[in-house]
């Protein structure tokens, strides 16, 4: 079975680095690319044809929710939201679910969650593996 191809879309270079490191920590996943905003991310969805998209909501040029609206026309990639505004029950989280997000993970400390790997790294790997049909890892 081929490794699931992951595309990461987040406007923060720091968050792209942290989330990218989380994805790369699992040898059964492939980080196919990373985009700095929604518009660039949508272009990468077209060219890279990822299996999973890790998507922030608040971004310049095109929000994550707008990306999801456009993606539904061009891709079958599953979307996992990783965002500070996607708290359970928030309007953004509800809209993301309505647009087809398979999982929503709230950044634990706001937009710049330096503790993301520590607090949510395992949850991110579990969400990707679940969406990809891979066996789930043991809890650390």
Image: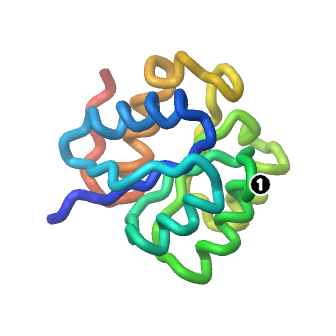
Residue depicted at 64% across the width and 62% down the height: 39
Whether residue 11 is situated above or below residue 61 in the rendered picture: above
Residue depicted at 46% across the width and 68% down the height: 77
Where disc 1 sits, the SS reads helix
Q: Around disc 1, counting alpha carbons within 10 Å, would you say few (fewer than 14), some (14 to 19), or many (20 or more)?
A: some
In the image shown, does 96 or 15 lie closer to the viewer? 15
Q: Residue 117: percent from the left, percent from the top?
A: 45, 23
Whether residue 122 is situated above or below residue 34 in the rendered picture: above
In the displayed structure, does residue 84 sit left or right of residue 132?
right
In the image shown, does 133 or 45 lie closer to the viewer? 45
* Residue 137 placement: quadrant: top left
In the displayed structure, does residue 86 sit left or right of residue 28?
right
Residue depicted at 48% across the width and 68% down the height: 45
Q: Residue 87: percent from the left, percent from the top?
A: 73, 37
In the image shown, does 109 or 131 lie closer to the viewer? 109
* Residue 51 placement: quadrant: bottom left
In the displayed structure, does residue 17 sit left or right of residue 1?
right
Q: Residue 105: percent from the left, percent from the top?
A: 59, 39
Residue depicted at 53% across the width and 68% down the height: 43
Q: How many marks do you count on the picture? A: 1
Q: Which residue is mark 1?
A: 94
């Amino acid at each position: 079975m081929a490794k699931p191809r992951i595309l990461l879309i987040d406007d923060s270079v720091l968050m792209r680095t942290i989330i990218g490191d989380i994805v790369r920590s699992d040898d059964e996943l492939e980080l196919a690319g990373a985009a700095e905003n929604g518009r660039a991310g949508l272009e990468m969805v077209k060219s890279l044809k990822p299996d999973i998209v890790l998507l922030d909501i608040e971004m310049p040029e095109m929000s994550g929710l707008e990306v999801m609206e456009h993606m539904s026309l061009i891709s079958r990639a599953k979307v996992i939201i990783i965002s500070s505004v996607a708290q359970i029950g928030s309007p953004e989280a509800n809209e993301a679910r309505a647009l087809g997000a398979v999982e929503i993970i709230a950044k634990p400390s706001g937009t710049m969650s330096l503790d993301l790997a520590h607090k949510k790294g395992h949850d991110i790997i579990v969400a990707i593996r679940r969406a990809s049909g891979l066996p789930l890892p043991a809890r650390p």
